[in-house]
Amino acid sequence: MAEAKAPAYDNASALGRALNWVDERFPLTVLWKSQVAEYYAPKNFNFWYFFGSLALLVLVNQIVTGIFLTMNYKPDATLAFASVEYIMREVPWGWLIRYMHSTGASAFFIVVYLHMLRGIMYGSYRKPRELTWLFGVGIFLTLMGEAFFGYLLPWGQMSFWGAQVIVNLFGAIPVIGPDLAVWIRGDYVVSDATLNRFFALHVIAFPLVLIGLVAAHLIALHETGSNNPDGVEIKKIKDPKTGHPKDGIPFHPYYTVKDIFGAAIFLILFSVILFFAPELGGYFLEHNNFIPADPLKTPPHIAPVWYFTPFYSILRATTEAVIPILAVAVVVLAVMTVLTIRSKTWKMIVLGGAAVAIVGLFTLDAKLWGVVLMGVSVLAFAALPWLDRSPVKSIRYKGPIFKTMLALFILSFLVLGYLGILPPTPGRTLVAQVFMFVYFAFFFLMPWYSAMDSWKPVPERVTG
Amino acid sequence: MMQKLFAAAVFAAVALAPNFAAAAEEGVKLDPAPIDVANRASVQAGARTFVNYCLGCHSLSLVRYNSLTQIGLSEEQIKDNLLFAGDKVGDPMASAMTKKDGKVWFGTAPPDLSVIGRSRGADWLYTYLRGFYRDPTTQTGWNNVAFPNVGMPHVMWRLQGERSLVKPEAGKDGHAAAGAAPKFVQMSAGTQTANEFDATVRDLVAFLAWASDPTQLKRKQIGVIVLLALTLLAFVSWLLYKEYWKDVH
């Protein structure tokens, strides 16, 4: 492609000659400039913009420590538990590698949740960044699968029974459910066969997908350019002399040095947990998971790890009692949608879908609807680019309704997460049910409240 | 303003939700275990108690005898004082009792205690080991306030002596007040006073807590160094960041 182009480096030095040699065969300099050194990012990134690079850092941590863990881990139901303890006790620095991996798992979800919250606050999912957002949702889903498969591997009581509970959810699907659950487990209960396949999925299948999606996420991001806390498109105002955005700065060196500083602060917090409280009071490593898996002894209280508990709470909160309320919600949403949209075809589709849902709600088991709602609670993020109808992107220029709904959403996420850790009582289930509706209201009422909300005019340039 | 409202909302939601504070644990209130895993004399005394009283039935299969050098014992001391005849110093601390025998004798095989300090926690162990009392209705003649109808008899009863449990007074609603400390009556004296026995159990629990996570002391020492290094990295990278960003306006 570059036969007519002059070499980018001085042929007098050996390094220059080597780089020119590569450039003639591979677009090394072109890629470096377009993706890093001359990738112009808005200059007003704040605290919230650290979490993307931190997620990448944690991903690398998980992959590198994971490789070393597989060197001593035994994916065998009779050996797995002891092999993890062997890593902790006998393998030189094995305890460090294992704690880096186990703390990294929780850290991954912390930075990813904060990264997602950033996207919601500043409208990073809005046009033209919908695909970046969708790849991100794909990363989140893959990460949940990755964490779920990985959690079985220590073969403790929570590993075993957690996997049992989650795989049994698939059994709630009508007709094919029970066979599907057996197919996933490879056995009638979670067993050695399950451990072996979860190991395979955890160490190769899902990491491959994860890396592919991360690449797609970054490629899409670099195509559109990054959003910023003002939601201003910096590409609109360019310096006529240089052709670069006036509010943009090269990613390297400005954001590389800033992200190194962010990484150092993150690593300090990470190390405090890793070295001084690796169990974090039973939240990062559950106490019961230090009991070897025993298929004959069901623990009285099976709690998933903290990062799954908001969704687990929604699963548990979907009891017979909320089915009529769900039916009312479906009817209200369908009517509101039909009154809002113009396309006749879509009106028919919405009404038909609602009718099917109503019939299903009253004929199928509530347990199945719990599974469905849990799935919807995760997948709803993917719909955000099309649910948000506010004329502005960033929370800085959005009105009080959006701010209130977002605050309620964060609150419901935290409360549902907290309740998911605890064993259920009638009172707690009621609280979970209320917050479940708050959680869904944030997503499914957004087309209306975001359109009717007030907004402030967005400035031409970023405000810093 | 938003943040304050939000904080108030979180607080209200948590405060109003019923029984939020009540933890999942039921039953007896746990005594905090006054252990110090860094106290070598205490952990060594616990190791001795473990070998004398526990190892007959309970294995510590993930701990090798010679890993006790990490708590300050020499291999000679381990060989002379702790090893059973026929065991080698590199062997795991395994009980001679088979699982099958254990199941026949106690109804359930005595569990391996390698990570019991992490699954049960030190406070539970400290309460449990001091919670035995005479109960003629059970198979073994013993019962426990932390683990009702446990299959294990009071192995250290000669040290503590025999005690009986005072039935807790029923509250207004007919149920015993939850979380109330159990009351015992000493039936016969042991070879140790109550305080001495508490110390024996404390040392044993300290040993089990060490055995559950033998690298914990080293981990914390290394952690301090790592944090110092990272603080330096944070400082230098902050300077670098400020230097580069001087020309961003």
Image: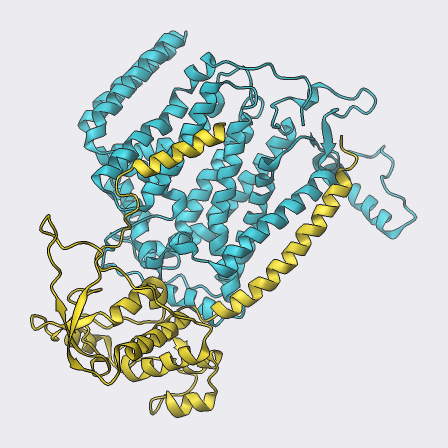
Chain colours: A cyan, B yellow
Residue A133 position in % (x across, y down): 52, 30
Lateral position of residue A276 relative to residue A224, left or right: left
Q: Quadrant of the C terminus of chain A?
A: top right
Q: From the viewer's perspective, is A315 left or right of A285?
A: left
Question: x and y percent of residue B240 in the render?
Answer: 74, 46
Q: Among all residues in the image, which is located at the extreme right?
A: A12
Which is nearer the eye, A327 or A3? Answer: A327
Q: Is residue A365 visible?
A: no
Q: Is residue A284 above or below residue B124?
A: above
Q: Quadrant of the N terminus of chain A?
A: top right
Give the residue drawn at x 79%, y 42%: A23
Residue at image coords 40%, 55%: A281
- Give the percent coordinates (x, y) of residue B81: 38, 90
Q: Is residue A265 visible?
A: yes
Residue B127, image quadrant: bottom left
Instruction: Name which residue lies at 63% across and 22% down.
Output: A232
Q: Position of residue B172 (x, y in %)?
A: 11, 49
Number of dots carrying numbers: 0
Q: Is residue B121 left or right of residue A12?
A: left
Q: Is residue B4 left or right of residue B149?
A: right
**Closest to the observer: A166 or A207?**
A166
